[in-house]
Amino acid sequence: MGAGFWNSILYLVVGLLVGGALGFFFTKRNFEKQLKENPPVNEKMIRAMFMQMGRKPSEAQIRAIMKSMGQ
């Protein structure tokens, strides 16, 4: 095996590392942008949904919904 083979392996590994790092960076940035534009559901949103349905939610109902959503 010559030097050309090892150089191509080295370039492949370096390319994979650089591509992985860039992919991670851009994915993280896009995810944070999406969270800022579309925040997760909070208690105010649950109250508004109940009010739109014509119901007045109790604190226990709101806490139960938040707990069932895992927040």
Image: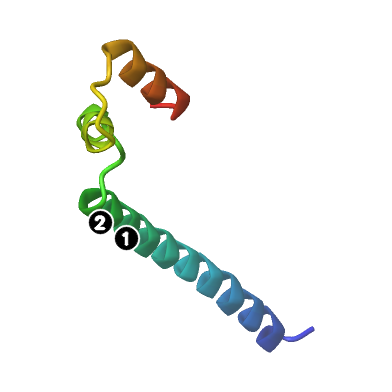
Q: Is residue 45 above or below residue 27?
A: above
**8 left or right of 21?**
right
Image coordinates of residue 45 in percent, x first then y, are 24, 35
Image position, residue 40 (x, y; %): 31, 40
User: Which quadrant does the C terminus fall into?
Assistant: top left
Where is residue 20? Give x, y as percent. Answer: 49, 64
Q: In the rendered view, does 26 fall on the left or right side of 51?
A: right
Above or below, 46 against 67 in this view is below
Q: Report if the CB atoms under discs 2 and 1 are less than 8 Å apart.
A: yes
Here the colouring is rainbow
User: Which labelled disc corresponds to residue 33?
Assistant: 2
Label 1 is placed on what type of residue? Asn
Residue 28 in the figure: left or right of residue 69: left
Position in image of residue 68 (x %, y %): 46, 24
User: Which of these two is toward me, 12 or 60?
Assistant: 60
Q: Which part of the image, by quadrant, shows the N terminus? A: bottom right
Q: Secondary structure at mark 2?
A: helix
Residue type marked 2: Lys
Find disc 1 in the rendering and name its residue.
Answer: 30
Real-space Cα separation, disc 2 to disc 1, in angstroms: 5 Å
The quarter of the picture where residue 18 lies is: bottom left
